[in-house]
Amino acid sequence: MTALQLEIQLVAIVVAVACALPGVFLILRRMAMMSDAISHAILPGIVVGFFITESLGSPLLIVAAGLTGLLTVALVELIERTKLVKEDAAIGIVFPVLFSIGVILIARYAGDVHLDTDAVLLGELAFAPFDRFTAFGLDLGPRALWVMGAALGLNALFLLLFYKELKLATFDAGLAATLGFLPGLLHYALMGLVSLTAVSAFDAVGSILVVALMVGPPATAYLLTDRLNWMIGISAGVGALGAVGGYWLAHALDASIAGAMATATGLIFGAAVLFAPGRGVVARVRLRNRQTWRFAEQMLTIHLLQHENTPQAQRECRVAHLQEHLNWDAPFAEKVVNRGTRRGTVERRGPYLALTDDGRALAQDALERT
């Protein structure tokens, strides 16, 4: 691995982890699409900041973009509070308008500088190592690594300082307000961090990957755990894994690194959807199958209990009669009986079936629950 490849992956990992931290709270607050709105709507802030400073490297661009992100959140909430449209519609109204204003400003007044819409949308991680940060004549590495490192540090510091308040405001904003935790202020501080992170990552990965990294890893972690601290850690890990995996996928396919990272993140999420313990598709299918067989076994024991020691027992307790009485086909009835004998709830006595003590207890317990 060359030094260039290592630096690209380091930048990718730092970007992914920086985006994943605030993304956890966006997912928990059901505001995932707000990251999409902010990442697009801050474009006019970048353009206005460039007009003021006439420099693409000025920190004022980040400040202007962050303020535009907060403006986006405020406008969305203002429209939503009218009760005329829901939040998704408000987002769909606000961010295209702001993004379009940015596009028009670029096309009209900044067409001759490197501030084109393709760069904003897609970014280019491969170029990150060529923009170096130097101090006192020393090369301190890619500028993107320092910028995103600062964003990551700020996000991590915010979570450390306000973890308890954020947790309470996320799950019970009313209680947080009662206890004096100012959930509204925390909300706008979080949105400010989302804006800051999004604009910091623009030059390296573009707005589309910012959305993927803010939503994909936390959504994956959401499927894997119910604990907030674990969710934050898993989100960071999934983001880093998607960054490294995406880089090597792009290397193998000679494709866009940002696109490959988004694809890798999506594949990891897809794997979680299928195989997440307890919540994945496979786990839910296995649970449904277990419930089906357990219900059938209960039905069998209840049927046998109701006819136990009655004049109808010789007819009702035959395996062949289950097809008629319980409307089961022969293979299914045989499987249910075999399951019952394996589990010790039913025993065969020639062509007849009889309950064991465990089977009798199972049937009585099921009847008491109904």
Image (cartoon, rainbow, N blue to C red):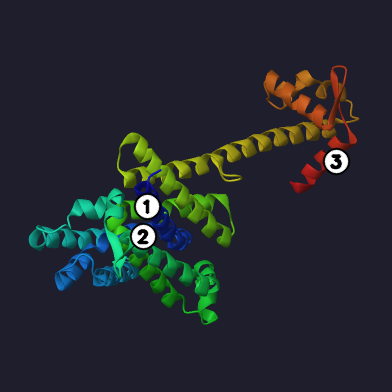
Seen from the viewer's position, the closer of residues 53 and 34 is: 53
| CA–CA distance in space, label 2 to label 3 | 65 Å
Element carrying mark 3? helix
Mark closer to the observer (1, 3): 1
Identify the amino acid type marked 1. Answer: Glu
Across and down, in percent, residue 320 comes to 76, 18
Element carrying mark 2? helix
Q: Residue at x 22, y 53 (%)?
A: 119
Across and down, in percent, residue 7 comes to 37, 52
Q: Residues within 10 Å of mark 1 (few under 14, many from 20)?
A: some
Across and down, in percent, residue 329 comes to 67, 21
| CA–CA distance in space, label 2 to label 1 | 8 Å
Q: Which mark is residue 368?
A: none
Identify the amino acid type marked 2. Answer: Leu
Q: Earlier in the sequence, mark 2 or mark 3?
A: 2
Seen from the viewer's position, the closer of residues 92 and 351 is: 92
Across and down, in percent, residue 138 comes to 32, 65
- Name the residue carrying label 1: 7
Element carrying mark 1? helix
Seen from the viewer's position, the closer of residues 20 and 324 is: 20
- Name the residue carrying label 2: 145
Query: Contact, CB < 8 Å: mark 2 with mark 1?
Result: yes
The N terminus, quarter of image: top left
Mark closer to the observer (2, 3): 2
Q: Earlier in the sequence, mark 1 or mark 3?
A: 1
Task: Identify the image quadrant of residue 142.
Answer: bottom left
| In the image: residue 204, left or right of residue 309 | left
Q: Which mark is residue 361?
A: 3
